[in-house]
Amino acid sequence: MQTPEVRAGLLSRRRFFQWTSSLAATVGLAPAMSSARALAEPTLPEGEDYYDKLGVTKIINAAGTYTMFTAACMPPSVLAAVQKAALHPVRLHDLQQKSGEYIAKKLQCEGAIVTSGASGAISLATAACMQHANNISPLAMPQAIDGMKNQVIVQKAHRYGYDHAMFLCGARVTEVVTMDDYKRACDAGNAIMTNFFNAAEEEDGLPGTAQIGREEWLRVAHDHGIPCHIDAAADMPPISNLWKYTGMGFDLVAFSGGKGMRGPQNAGLLLGKKELIDLANQNNNPGDGVGRGMKVAKEQVVGMVAAVDWVLSHTEESMQGDYQKRVDVIVKQVKDIPSVKTETVVPKIANHVPHLLIRFDPAATGTTTKEIVAALRAQTPSIELNPNTGRKPNQGIPSDANTLVVGVWMLQPGEDEIVGKHIRAALTKKA
Ligand SMILES: *Cc1c(COP(=O)(O)O)cnc(C)c1O
């Protein structure tokens, strides 16, 4: 006769099978789970739509990989990997180690970590370099590094909002403009690393553009034994950038996982030299160092690995060609509207994908950029255009007051038609 505990155990076991088989069915794994399925009771209801339940408006993302618009949606293969990973606990260190080794091999570098994002990668990179320079424990940061080396050398034109990802380790920035400044900063003997903002030269030729290029930057720092980090967060595609910068000699490279790579939005990559990656790992969760609050759950670790596989399953041409097709679909809808001129622009470094610029004359269309943006937002689902819409040239996008900018790469299948239709309606005042 069974005790209540055993019966309870059986029940939960059966519930487990019921749950796994229904989940398996939703991710297309049913055949492999057939023995479990035989034991299964009727399937659980489908997941609820919590956006609807909460009253959160769903959007069509014709903007791009903006965090405020929750950036990318994961492709089906990544989503399926995330769901499958959610079925089983594992030993976190085991997963961190093996995922790092797998990614390093695929991306042709010595070491890799799945981080909480590019920003988290910058923090772990800084913590690693702080340890490397001062031979301290992760627990010394940021409160116990007074009097130690703590400077990150950065070109003035490369200062940005992500500096805080370094500050939180206790690091401070030494700003340089000229090569002489740079050499002096390296000679000072208090630098732990350098930070290079890869996409900064998007503004090439504008006042304040950085004076020192990547090769020279690396050479001078390395002559002084200072490790170099490069922030390439938004700089895939091209796919080859995933190994280009480590190949050039950057000791550490950060990528965002939830932008062009289309992994989970709270994931990213830190790639680089084995010694520094090992130090970065000492600061990673679940340790008590600065990375503790940058936890990456098993689902996101696996999702990021699957995203790397997804990216590598493409060629440069297939990826860019798909984005260009979406541009073409929208162009077709608007090209015969009076005064409208379309143009495809591919920014040089960050967001290096076709963006559609729709230029128009408000006197001819009888409508302003502001009215069109509002009309698109009023749709269901609500449509968000690229934030450079109606602005002056920025980030490699030559926009102006009477230009709509459509970022097509985060559109879901079929949304190009919808966006084109509504832009046409707005430009012809039929919205
Ligand atoms: C987006 C971005 C980041 C932050 O990336 P997350 O993955 O959201 O943390 C850092 N640096 C640059 C240059 C970026 O574009």
Image (spheres, rainbow, N blue to C red):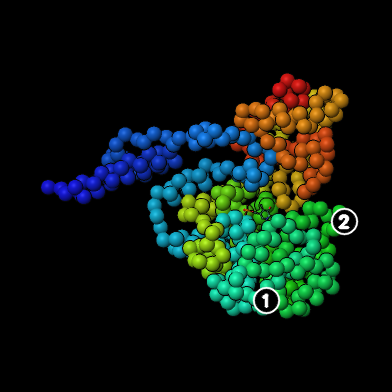
Q: How far apart are marks 2 and 1 (CA)?
A: 32 Å
Query: Who comes first in sequence, dot 2 or dot 1?
Result: 1
Asked whether residue 260 is in view, the answer is yes
Pointer 1 residue Cβ closer than 8 Å to ligand 1: no
User: What is the count of numbered marks?
Assistant: 2
Q: What amino acid type is highlighted by mark number 2?
A: Pro
Q: Ligand 1 quadrant? A: bottom right
Quadrant of residue 367 in the image? top right
Question: 41 or 344: nearer the eye?
Answer: 41
Residue 184 image offset from top left, x and y in percent: 80, 76
Q: Is residue 41 left or right of residue 161?
A: left
> Label 1 near label 2: C-beta < 8 Å?
no
Q: Is residue 145 left or right of residue 39?
A: right
Mark number displayed over residue 149: 1
Instruction: Give the labeled residue for mark 2.
Output: 207
Element class at badge 2: loop
Q: Is residue 193 above or below residue 355?
A: below
